[in-house]
Each structure stands twice: as C-alpha cells, then as structure tokens.
Amino acid sequence: MNSTIKMAQHLRYIRVFYKKSIMKYFFIVLILLSLQDAACNKNRESQGNCSMVTITSRLPACTGWNIVVNGNIYPSANIPVEIQKDGKTACVQYELYNDPRLCGCCGGTWANIKSIK
C-alpha cells in the first residue's frame, strides 16, 4: 500500500510538471504570435499610405527630377538615383512643402520624398 501511495504522488508530480511545461510553451507561442501580428500590422500600415506617381525629368527650362501626381508636376531634391528613370511609376510617400527661394527653377511647391516602394 505504501508503494501505491508513493506511485500516486510520483504520478501527481509528473502531471503537475507536464502541465507547467505545456503552459510555458503555450505562453511562449502566444507571445511570438502577438509579436508577429504587431509586425505585420505595422508593415501593412506603412504600405497603405503611398500614392502611385510618375517620375520625370521633364520640367520646362529646369533640370532635376520631379514627381507627377494627378497631372501636377512637383520638383523633388531627394529622389534616389535608382528610381531616376523618365516615366517610371512608383508607390511614393511624400509631403508637399512651399519653397520660398526666388529663382527660375526653384521656389513654389516641392515634394519631400519620405519613402519609395
């Protein structure tokens, strides 16, 4: 009888240890899934804010690269070299700002490129 009590206690310890290890792995997997979901949502948000624009270097009497948005041409000083191809379309995050310089090809509304995909 003494051996059956010891065996029951031993089985109870094994069961408790097994439950704790299962719970530990469950929480690890749950945390990893939460991190993955957060990363995917961040990625999805950053992709959703871009606009399709056309890259061009054709601005009357001026040199440099520009973006065309809904038929409007905005010069930009920070278009990457690998994107500088006439007629290329890209998904661009940008903001428009007013350039107060007073020269023939500067001043007016410019585009500040934040990211290009």
Image (cartoon, rainbow, N blue to C red):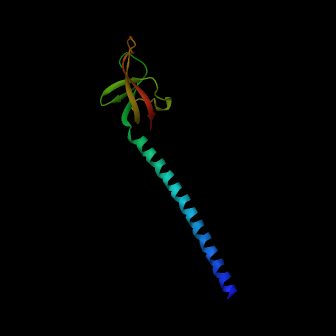
Q: Where is residue 5 drawn, in percent x and y?
A: 65, 83
Q: Is residue 23 left or right of residue 89?
A: right
Q: Where is residue 97 drawn, in percent x and y?
A: 38, 23
Report whether residue 108 is seen: yes
The furthest residue to the bottom: 1
The C terminus lies in quadrant: top left
User: Looking at the picture, does residue 18 appear above or below residue 29?
Assistant: below
Q: Going 63% across and 78% down the picture, which residue do you hit?
A: 11
Q: Going 35% across and 29% down the picture, which residue do you hit?
A: 68
Front residue (pair 56, 9)? 9
Q: Is residue 87 left or right of residue 2?
A: left
Q: Quadrant of residue 69?
A: top left
Q: Where is residue 74 drawn, in percent x and y?
A: 36, 24
User: Looking at the picture, does residue 52 appear above or below residue 64?
Assistant: below
Q: Going 38% across and 38% down the picture, which residue do you hit?
A: 49
The N terminus lies in quadrant: bottom right
Q: Quadrant of residue 42?
A: top left
User: Looking at the picture, does residue 115 appear above or below residue 19?
Assistant: above
Q: Going 68% across and 81% down the picture, which residue do you hit?
A: 6
Q: How many marks?
A: 0
Q: Is residue 46 left or right of residue 23?
A: left
Front residue (pair 69, 56)? 69
Report whether residue 89 is seen: no
Q: Where is residue 28 drawn, in percent x and y?
A: 56, 58
Front residue (pair 66, 24)? 24
